[in-house]
Amino acid sequence: MASGLFAAREKISKLKAILDLGFKAPIKETDMVLYLGASHGVTALLVSGMAGENGFVFCVEMSKDSMKYLLKVCETRANMAPLLFDASLPLQYKGLVAKCDVIYMDIAQKSQADILKKNADMFLKKGGTIIFIVKTQSIDTVKAPLLFLEDLKKQLSWMEIDFIADLDKTHAKHYAVIGKKK
Ligand SMILES: C[S@@+](CC[C@H](N)C(=O)[O-])C[C@H]1O[C@@H](n2cnc3c(N)ncnc32)[C@H](O)[C@@H]1O
């Protein structure tokens, strides 16, 4: 259970926002999870709790500043490992990450859909779960949301989308795309 400042931050977690909207987060005990964009570890900690002691969370983060906080969080959990890497270069951490049941990605980058595919090709099991947090502004500042989502679905044709959660109420211009690798 998080406390103090961490508990306050947990409230702003996008995963928490998905759950609060009534969606079921498809992360279960024993899952191996690749978390891209772990930042300070707020949501990664929630994911670690869901995966349980027999699951594992590989936490990729490229910012050295964020890594200082992430390291401290990972020290408190036996099922979390911090990895200081750029998620657009998955070959660099290939030997460090196992085949995964879930990829959780929240990197707010323009090329996020391509980066997700590269990682899914390398690490995600067939039928594995994808939780992809997208910020419309990270990709295109001009396109209206509906057009943006249609384009995004085309880019994600390799995955079977179960649902798209609109997180705008708590996280402006954010959606969560949740589904499986075909
Ligand atoms: C919106 S924050 C993530 C917040 C986090 N998911 C949470 O809920 O606690 C985005 C993070 O992605 C990281 N990031 C952006 N591009 C990245 C990349 N190519 N590889 C790894 N991390 C990246 C940023 O440094 C930042 O910490």
Image (cartoon, rainbow, N blue to C red):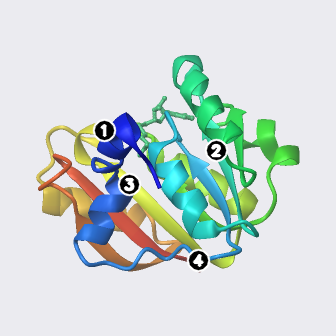
Position of the C terminus by quadrant: bottom right
Q: Can you tell which quarter of the image residue 111 is in?
A: top left
Q: Which comes sooner in the sequence, label 2 or label 1?
A: 2
Is residue 37 rendered to the left or right of residue 138? Answer: right
- Which mark is nearer the camera, 4 or 1? 4
Q: Which residue is mark 1?
A: 138
Q: Which residue is mark 3?
A: 133
Q: Residue 80 placed where, x, y %?
A: 69, 49
- Badge 1 crowding class, 10 Å Cα cut-off, few under 14, some 14 to 19, many 20 or more, is some
Whether label 3 lies within 8 Å of ligand 1 gets the answer: yes
Q: Real-space Cα distance between discs 4 and 1?
A: 29 Å
Q: Real-space Cα distance between discs 4 and 2?
A: 17 Å
Please determine whether, in this image, residue 1 is positioned above or below residue 182.
Answer: above
In the image, what residue type sits under mark 3? Ile
Q: Residue 160 placed where, x, y %?
A: 47, 80
Whether pointer 2 and pointer 3 mark residues with C-beta atoms closer than 8 Å, the reply is: no
Q: Which residue is mark 2?
A: 59
Q: Which comes sooner in the sequence, label 1 or label 3?
A: 3
Q: Which comes sooner in the sequence, label 4 or label 1?
A: 4
Q: Which residue is mark 4?
A: 28
